[in-house]
Amino acid sequence: MKLPLIYYGHSLLRKKAQPVVEITKEIKKLIQDMLETMQGLDGLGIAAPQVGKSLAIFITAAPVEDGKGGFTQASPRVFINPKLSNPTEQGWEHSEACKSIPKLSGDVTRPVQITVTAQDINGKEFTEVFTGWPARVIMHENDHLNGVLFIDRIPQDQRKKMENALRKIKKQYNP
């Protein structure tokens, strides 16, 4: 079932998500619904707080190089209670956007590579190193679990130019 998104200005987007204590039928159903929601929005990722659930869960389907100079979308990955570590010192600046902040984007610098330890949908813990787009999408979604939005990471001059649009989003979606 496609879930409704919450938008910039909603207080839940600024709260730290709670850890998942047990992966129940309800949690698995939430993950399935989040997946349908992400796919319905043509998103690269979605975090539980974006659908109104303060839980440490996100899903990604980041672009990956296809070996022919192009990109294809990866199969969806579920991350429960993720912990990020070992970011590279080398940064990579690229434009980011967010479904919870419609029609806006900004340049965000993030590490090129990150290590993630998390649980999958069956509760199995894994540790994996991600590079490039998959790393970027993971860091963006993980920020949602910590109450951080991409607009918090863009240069101040870009943020200043967005203020009117952000006020309109806040007013439109959170009357």
Image (cartoon, rainbow, N blue to C red):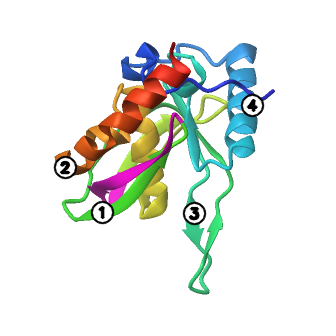
Magenta stretch in the rendered image: 100-114
* Front label number (3 vs 1): 1
Closer to the chain start, of discs 3 and 1, is 3
Helix, strand or loop at label 1? It is strand
Write down the residue under mark 1: 93
Is residue 138 or residue 86 the one in the foreground? Answer: 138
Closer to the chain start, of discs 4 and 2, is 4
Write down the residue under mark 4: 32
Residue at x 53%, y 23% (from the top left corner): 172
* Front label number (1 vs 2): 2
Q: CA distance from mark 4 to mark 2?
A: 39 Å
Amino acid marked by disc 1: Glu
Residue at x 75%, y 42% (from the top left corner): 40
Q: Residues within 10 Å of mark 2 (few under 14, many from 20)?
A: few
* Front label number (1 vs 4): 1
**Could you say which disc has been placed on residue 63 in the image?**
3
Q: How many marks?
A: 4
Q: Residues within 10 Å of mark 3 (few under 14, many from 20)?
A: some
Is residue 119 or residue 151 the one in the foreground? Answer: 151
Amino acid marked by disc 2: Asp
Closer to the chain start, of discs 1 and 4, is 4
Write down the residue under mark 2: 157
Helix, strand or loop at label 3? It is strand
